[in-house]
Image (cartoon, helix red, strand yellow):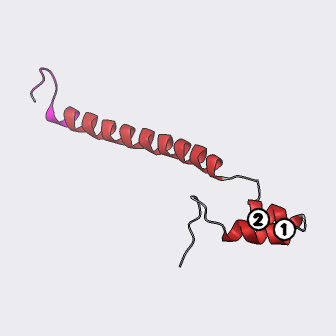
């Protein structure tokens, strides 16, 4: 790539600066996305079995734990 009026040194410096700028912007965009994703994962609601257990409905809590659920498959 030959651009009129520029030296090889200037092109090298410009390329290095652009790589650093892209890396720095990518880092901050990734951190922002990670913070938003972590906020989605932190849910303050207790699971249904813990809620039933706190209310003293132990038989129903056991049934909730033993029933198959698409989010929590039963392990053999």
- 26 inside magenta stretch: no
Is residue 40 rendered to the left or right of residue 55? left
Q: Name the disc covering residue 49, or none.
A: 2
Q: Where is residue 28 in the image (x, y as percent from the top left)?
A: 50, 42
Task: Name the residue carrying label 1.
Answer: 53
Q: How far apart are marks 2 and 1 (CA)?
A: 6 Å
Residue 71: which quarter of the image? bottom right
**Residue in front for this viewpoint, 37 or 58:** 58
Rendered view: 17 above or below 43: above
**Residue in front for this viewpoint, 60 or 16:** 60
Residue farthest along the right direction in this orientation: 56
Residue 22: which quarter of the image? top left
Q: Determine the residue positioned at 14% across, 21% down.
A: 5
Q: Position of residue 30 (x, y in %)?
A: 48, 45
Residues under numbered marks 2 and 1 in contact, where contact means CB atoms less than 8 Å apart: yes
Q: Give the range drawn in magenta.
A: 2-10
**Residue in front for this viewpoint, 47 or 18:** 47
């Amino acid at each position: 790539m030959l651009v009129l009026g520029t030296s090889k040194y200037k092109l090298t410096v410009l390329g290095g600066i652009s790589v650093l700028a892209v890396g720095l912007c990518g880092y901050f965009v990734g951190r922002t996305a990670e913070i938003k994703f972590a906020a989605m994962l932190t849910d303050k609601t207790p699971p249904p079995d813990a809620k039933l257990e706190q209310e003293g409905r132990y038989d129903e809590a056991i049934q909730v734990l033993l029933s198959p659920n698409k989010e929590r498959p039963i392990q053999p």
